[in-house]
Amino acid sequence: MAPPEGFVDLATAYKATLNSSVSVIGVVIDIMAPHRVAKTGHWMFTFKLLDQSLQESVYGSEGLTVRFFKENERSLPQIREHGDVVLLRYLKMMEYRGVPVAMCNFATKALVFPGASIPTPTYSIAYQGTNRLQSLGVPEDIAKLSLTEQAYAIKLKAELRMPDAKFANTVTETVGRKRDAEPVHDAGPPEKKARLSTFGSKFQLVRETRHMKFADLCVQVVRKFSSQFGNCELYVTDYTENREIWYYAPPEEEDERPRDGDDYGYSKQPKKVWPGPYGWLTLKVNVRDPHSVFANSKVDEGDFLLLRNVKMKIMAEGAKLEGDMWRDDGYPAKINIVKLMSNDVPELQELLVRKEKYWAKRQARHRPKADEPEKLGKTEKKRQKKQRQQEEQAKVAAAATLVAERNKHVRCNNDEALLMSVKDILDLSNARHTNSLPNGTSYVLPFINTQYRTKVQVVDYEPKAHEDFAVPRLSDEDEELSPIDAVEWDASQKFEWYFSLCLQDPTPASAPFQARDVAKPRMWAHVRHEDAQYLFGNDMDDPQDLRSNSQMLAKLREKMCILWGNLEEKAEVEVASNRPFECCIQEYGIELDDEDPEKADVPLGFKKLFRMFGTTIL
């Protein structure tokens, strides 16, 4: 059975030369649960494909490994279980620990045919006209599917002898890179991949749920109502939007019309004030015995839950998508509600971040209006006027700092974003990192996955020796394959950039001299290899051993001098004289080791760190 035009069988792909581009179609026989790579923040998804050519060969009979890296989980191929057929265009063949690996790149296109939807060849005639197999992917990629490619997928699924499938659902703990070089002082501990946790193949976000599908959900309880028959209704959210569920209008939209949704079985009584979130963010789940016994006695509003095996349904025309949790006849005593008592679960961490962003955005848009001026007394009017004047003065002072002379030889690639000061980014008072619950309690988020644009001056750097800005590259055995390593890395390259810069808000040139040495909040920003390559631009070669390459070392000094002026030459008691520059900063977090004494002093055991990116020295 020859592959369609433009495709090769998996045996050919397995033997393809490094860096060559291949397009393949195969059956999924092994899946590793997607997880976030701590070093880059990308989502990684690994699976194996098999076809007859590879199954019958003397090599690679366990399948061809395929690895995807995407900025968000939604962009990964929507593979659900072994037996799915996957069509992949324009993969790049690489090698990892001596084994061929097919890597995605910016040109890669993916289509997934759910195994259950693929007919036997006997019924394939129904798919030879305008009909198409059910496939998951980008609409424009689905439209490009040819009849030949579709027929090949049907025949491949029917003729392949499926081996025993493997599915990794275990909680794993992986450790990222740790270097023998001297650590960066006060710049945070060596980066470590956060502990991974997965709820299994049925786990979905609310936005992904569909009619007549089962799902495991990680949610927060917004409202709970018990009935006199022992049943329970849970209104839950994970802060993802699904237009098929009930809509809950925000206060500014409320009027005399009835609410679109259920009145919680209390239609003869006044409705409770809906605490939010608003819109299509809250899912109603109907809970019955034995699950309702646990929910009624153990679950409170505001709790975080794992709801297992929730059946999603739309009862009738005009109704909305809801969830049902009823007794499992096979396991009549099994309770599928789990209270999440620890915040170190990745899915719960992501929910908390989405929640913080939602309420911060809503608060900014719908800030309560102050009373009308004529209703205020003279004393209160005077106090508010003075407060406004002080706020305006503070804004002017802050603007003067940010509008200080800018280094025109350094460019930031996101000049449309608003400038934020280092002080505001650090958020020392945790104003932006404090999350308040509807019940009045609050907690501090360890970090927020977000990006900023700021104007700064460099006041220190690590390591102190420029020769140590390029460090030996870690071997494949010491680190996990990343998209940068796998797609862009030259196998002959032995060194990579790795250093950190200490940044602070600039002082206006017009400020008194004595004011320039006033202590200001400082932030250490890590500069990883790919970000350093972008920083140095195209006129800087790939890093080498700087202790034996004096020409490259001199070039590095020239580049950094543009960035930090006289910082290298100044004495300890002198104030650095360098022009501020604009740069992009990303905030992220790492989980500290259990034996790290600092772990007890940071929220949830995670430490907040910063990375500089998207900045170029011209």
Image (cartoon, grey):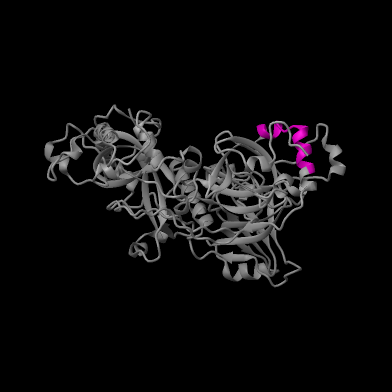
Please state the total of marks drawn on the protein image.
0
* Residue 145 lies within the magenta run: yes
State which quarter of the image contains the N terminus: top right
Task: Residue 59: say if magenta.
Answer: no
| Residue 151 in sight from this viewpoint | yes
The percent position of residue 81, horizontal first and vertical second, equals 69, 52
Residue at 50 percent across and 48 percent down: it is 481
Up/down of 517 relative to 176, above or below: above
In the orientation shown, which residue stands out farthest toward the front? 58
Q: Main secondary structure of the magenta part?
A: helix
- Look at 40% across and 65% down and name the residue there: 594
Q: Left of 58 or right of it: where is 580?
A: left
Camera-side residue of 393 and 308: 308
The residue located at (33%, 48%) in the rendering is 426
Please provide percent x and percent y for residue 493: 41, 40
State whether residue 583 is above or below residue 320: above
Image coordinates for residue 305, horizontal then vertical, percent: 57, 61
**In the rendered image of this protein, does residue 264 appear above or below residue 88?**
below
Q: Quadrant of residue 415?
A: top left
Over which residues does the magenta segment extend? 140-155
In-front residue for pair 147/322: 147
416 relative to 101 in the view: left or right:
left
- Out of 253 and 424, give the one closest to the viewer: 424
The part of the image, by quadrant, that contains residue 557 is top left
The x, y position of residue 398, in whole percent, is: 27, 37
